[in-house]
Image (cartoon, rainbow, N blue to C red):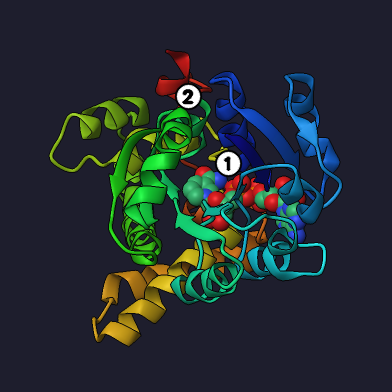
Amino acid sequence: MRYGFIGLGNLGGHLAASLLREGFDLTVHDLNQEAARNLIERGARWAQSPKDLATAVDAVITCLPSPAASAKVLTADNGVLNGLRAGGVWIEMSTTDQNEVHRIAALADARGIATLEAPVTGGVHRAAAGEITVLVGGDHTVYEKHLPALEAMGGSIFYMGELGNACVLKVITNMLAFIHLVAAGEALMLAKRAGLDLAQVFAAIKASSGTSFVHETESQLILNGSYNIGFTMDLACKDLGFASRYGRELGVPLELGGLTEQIFRRACAQYGGGAWSTQVVKLLEDALHTDLRAPGFPAVLESEEK
Ligand code: NAD
């Protein structure tokens, strides 16, 4: 099975590297050729356009920043759908809009191309280790055929049923994570203003009923001052926008989700769309002229040290 991978950014670069590590035949493409350099050095082939890539492979994986980028890569004249043969497969690993996945999948289907969605969750450190969680939607037979590739990139893999289901679940888990991030920032600030030792506070919360995956990973990056989670403010706002829309469409009041979206939009305006999403807690740090640094706190995620 020959795979193509388009979108070699903070996340996609690690996913593509996992495929190479596990011995998959890989062709890659990105708007920025420099993003492919490490992969090419390790044996990946470069394709000049999405169409060129698609003509050379059996399945194309995309990991792109927005529904507009996915639409362009798939449906433009030099796009994937004009290159993949009938019987080929498009695997969408971007966090994206359920309606767009259905729309493009229908165009693909008309050409005999199957679609799987496989958005991921867990962060770039898990992607780097090949342990990120993968949520999959689409035809079960197609899923089973591509399971070895998904297992090369991921740890836990959840088959969610029909196409579109994984898109929604992915946004739900991110909404939860962003709520947890804002909450972790408030908790750490309260502790700082109370004069507590933040390194000790981090460890105690981690061992308490108030802990969360976000605290255990992202709080470390806040305390060490790097904020470098490999996930931008733009992407967070995109995901919270999808969550709000699903809330409206499904008649579910998302009071915490809505508030969190507004907090992120303010942070995005203040620090820029390319700022790390963890910098949302800087709103509080700047408002109170109080930072959340913990002297001597490790500069890398505990999980990266393994
Ligand atoms: P990123 O912005 O770091 O990378 C996106 C890559 O896509 C860039 O290299 C860019 O050059 C490329 N690209 C954009 N438009 C293109 C086009 N038209 N043709 C070819 N290449 C193009 O984004 P990321 O952090 O890697 O995230 C990618 C997707 O994965 C997003 O949908 C994001 O929401 C999702 N995601 C990210 C993370 C994370 O931790 N970073 C985690 C889970 C899901």
Give x and y (percent) for residue 82: 74, 63
Residue 47 at x, y = what percent? Answer: 82, 42
Mark-to-mark CA distance, 1 and 2: 12 Å
Residue 185 is at least partly visible in this image: no
Q: Nearer the viewer, residue 85 or 290?
A: 85
Going by the numbered disc 1, the residue's amino acid type is: Leu
The disc placed on residue 230 is none
Residue 199 sits above or below residue 150 on the image? above
**Residue furthest top as drawn:** 306
Residue under the point 68% across and 48% down: 7
Which residue lies under the disc numbered 1? 11
Kindly identify which numbered label has been placed on residue 129.
2
Name which residue type carries label 2. Ala
Q: Is residue 229 left or right of residue 4?
A: left
Percent of width and height locating residue 204: 22, 29
Left or right side of 305 for 256: left
Task: Using the image, determine if residue 210 lies above or below residue 160.
Answer: above
- Residue at point 81%, 69% (across, down): 77
Q: Disc 1 beta carbon < 8 A from ligand 1? A: yes
